[in-house]
Image (cartoon, rainbow, N blue to C red):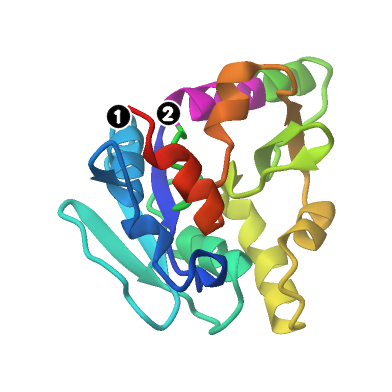
Amino acid sequence: IQADGLILAGGKSSRMGGHHKGSLTYKDETFTKILVRELKKEVQTVWLSYGREIKEYMNGCRIVRDIYNNSGPIGGIHAGLKVCGSDILLVAACDMPFLKIDLYYYLYEALSREEMWDCFIALAARYDGCVPVIDDRVHPLAAIYRKSAVKVLEEQIRDKNYCLRDALRKLDILYLDVTGESRFMRMLQNINTVQEYKAIEGER
């Protein structure tokens, strides 16, 4: 895949008692380090996305700051797409330590297949991204986006609407249902709370 990677690491971590989620560890590695390693299996450049405060630096990664302060994940993805050196950006939230590069291969193959079919039937459609879905719940923070999404994201941020799902409705997104695919369901698990973190701490 000709792509850059983006790890969204600028959240407030309020439900984690203020502990930066990217710095939490699983099997003696920080969540961020795990994600960097997975993305680096395919991409040359991995961006760490922050708002005003940079939580940590990591060798081999570049920092991107939000252009619009306090805009949440939509601001991180927007800034990431602006600096991305490729047309495609693989986005990962820093609280998803089970994510593997295999998910992005799966999304990218589905995207390529769908666009090839559209081309075959004389539709010139190119999607703005591919987002996995489990049980009707979209997972836009473990997804693929194209640079073509920037304009819609920026317009919505300027309107002070920071709901990423609202932006997705205005974009041409390929939704990929992975319900029942146990490997992907595990990958898309967020560790948001102290209780969820404690539940995985004993895993080896």
Marking on residue 101: 2
Left or right side of 19 for 138: right
Magenta residues span 100-112
Q: Amino acid at mark 2?
A: Ile
Q: Is residue 18 magenta?
A: no
Three-letter amino acid code at disc 1? Answer: Lys
Viewer-closest of 23 and 39: 23
C-alpha separation, residue under disc 2 versus residue under disc 1: 7 Å
* Residue at which label 1 appears: 41
| Tally of numbered discs | 2
Q: Few, some or many C-alpha atoms within 10 Å of disc 1 (few <14, some 14-19, many ≥20)?
A: few
Q: Residues within 10 Å of mark 2 (few under 14, many from 20)?
A: some
Whether residue 138 is situated above or below residue 22 in the rendered picture: above
Q: Residue at x 50, y 68 (%)?
A: 13
Q: Are marks 2 and 1 in contact (CB under 8 Å)?
A: yes
| Residue 185 or residue 82, whichever sits in front | 185
Q: Nearer the viewer, residue 172 or 167?
A: 167
- Decide: is 66 above or below 32: below
Quarter of the image with the N terminus is top left
Is residue 87 visible in the rendered image? The answer is no
Is 105 a magenta residue? yes
At x 48% / y 71%, what residue is drawn? 17
Marks 2 and 1, the one that precedes in the sequence: 1
